[in-house]
């Protein structure tokens, strides 16, 4: 039931052209407050420790931030296969207007063996390679001439200077050559080692695509803080799965609202709530319709302008009445 609901939402967002060609994948931990004897321990970054919990996987579009797949109950022995489960979910149902080309994830998401399966499906991937002490030592021995200086754009429209090294290496498990980009100069002690099967895209675009993967972590944080994703009280895993789906629905409604408000396409749910939804109103219920007089607020004109397209809709659950929104002339 939950999967069917997610597929219908996915197809609806696809019709609205809310998908790009890149998806970010990540895991999140949902603490469990019932009898935890049957659960595995998963690392919770929010609580900075491993605890009895349920692991969920999320798939987010890198441009619109729509999360169109989410599932609870991923076990340790299954997590390497989740990328294949997502591909099955993606390919099922209606074809997408903009086909998926890139899959972006971190080093713990899947095994090197499964990367070959992405090749077979014609998909490009970008991920981080696990760094051993021998790799770090080898990188540290390279002369300065081995590095190139790169300026990449950040979300704040500022540019950051990085040192990069681009090479081809043979990856055991993947069993063929892969492109490896070492990135340093980000303020971290250890360099980041990006691997990809895209040998054509410029280094700057590869780095930026991986950097955008952190948006899914931001969305997870937003769901924890605003939608209370880590406070599911259900005592059954299937109910927590349903809670996750409803949380994604609420999150999507905020994302759709953000895309309809000029200048707020990247605003978070808490920002939208404070600026537009946290308001009072006088409601007049009349025979011919319902009138809502919203109290004065700085961003109210923008909200009323967006609501114009809904003025002539009839709502069956309100006796087929129309709802009209107005700005009150009083505070």
Image: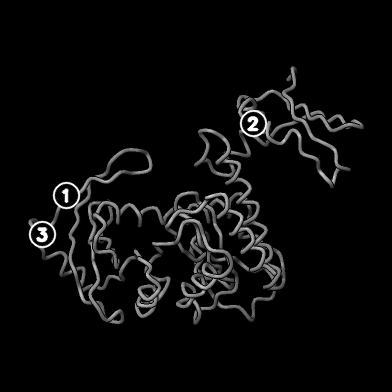
Q: Residues within 10 Å of mark 1 (few under 14, many from 20)?
A: few
Residue 153 at what x, y percent from top left?
Answer: 30, 43
Q: Secondary structure at mark 3?
A: helix
Q: How many other residues sit within 10 Å of disc 2, few (<14), some (14-19) or many (≥20)?
A: some
- For disc 2, the marked residue is 303
Total number of numbered discs in the rendering: 3
Q: Residue 328 location, x and y as percent?
A: 75, 21
Q: CA distance from mark 2 to mark 3?
A: 54 Å
In the displayed structure, 327 sits above or below 127; it is above
Q: Is residue 241 visible?
A: no
Q: Name the residue at 50% across, 58% down.
A: 60
Q: Nearer the viewer, residue 136 or 48?
A: 136
Give the CA distance from mark 1 to mark 3: 10 Å
Label 3 neighbourhood size at 10 Å, few (<14), some (14-19), many (20+)? few
Q: Which residue is mark 3?
A: 146
Q: Is residue 250 rendered to the left or right of residue 77? A: right
The picture places residue 168, in percent across and down from the top left corner, at: 19, 69
Residue farthest top in this picture: 329
Q: Identify the disc placed on residue 149.
A: 1
């Amino acid at each position: 039931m939950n999967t069917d609901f997610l597929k219908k939402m996915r197809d609806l967002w696809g019709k609205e052209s809310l998908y790009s060609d890149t998806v970010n994948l990540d895991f999140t931990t949902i603490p469990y407050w019932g009898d935890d004897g049957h659960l595995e321990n998963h690392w919770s970054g929010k609580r900075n420790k491993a605890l009895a919990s349920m692991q969920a996987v999320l798939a987010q579009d890198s441009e619109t931030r729509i999360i169109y797949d989410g599932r609870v109950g991923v076990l340790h022995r299954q997590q390497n296969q989740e990328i294949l489960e997502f591909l099955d979910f993606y390919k099922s149902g209606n074809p997408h207007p903009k086909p998926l080309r890139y899959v972006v994830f971190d080093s713990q998401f899947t095994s090197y063996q499964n990367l070959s399966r992405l090749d077979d499906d014609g998909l490009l991937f970008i991920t981080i390679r696990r760094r051993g002490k021998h790799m770090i030592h080898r990188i540290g021995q390279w002369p300065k001439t081995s590095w190139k200086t790169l300026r990449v754009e950040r979300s704040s429209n500022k540019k950051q200077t990085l040192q990069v090294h681009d090479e081809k290496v043979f990856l055991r498990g993947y069993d063929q050559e892969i492109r490896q980009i070492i990135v340093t100069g980000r303020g971290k002690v250890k360099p980041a080692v990006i691997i990809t099967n895209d040998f054509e895209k410029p280094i700057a675009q590869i780095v930026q695509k991986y950097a955008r993967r952190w948006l899914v972590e931001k969305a997870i944080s937003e769901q924890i803080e605003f939608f209370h994703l880590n406070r599911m009280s259900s005592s059954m895993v299937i109910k927590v799965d349903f809670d996750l789906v409803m949380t994604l629905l609420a999150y999507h409604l905020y994302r759709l609202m953000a895309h309809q408000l000029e200048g707020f396409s990247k605003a978070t749910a808490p920002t939208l709530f404070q600026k537009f939804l946290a308001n009072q109103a006088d409601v007049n219920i009349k025979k011919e319709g319902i009138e809502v007089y919203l109290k004065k607020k700085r961003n109210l004109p923008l909200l009323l302008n967006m609501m114009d397209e809904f003025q002539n809709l009839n709502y069956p659950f309100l006796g087929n009445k129309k709802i009209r929104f107005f700005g009150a002339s009083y505070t």
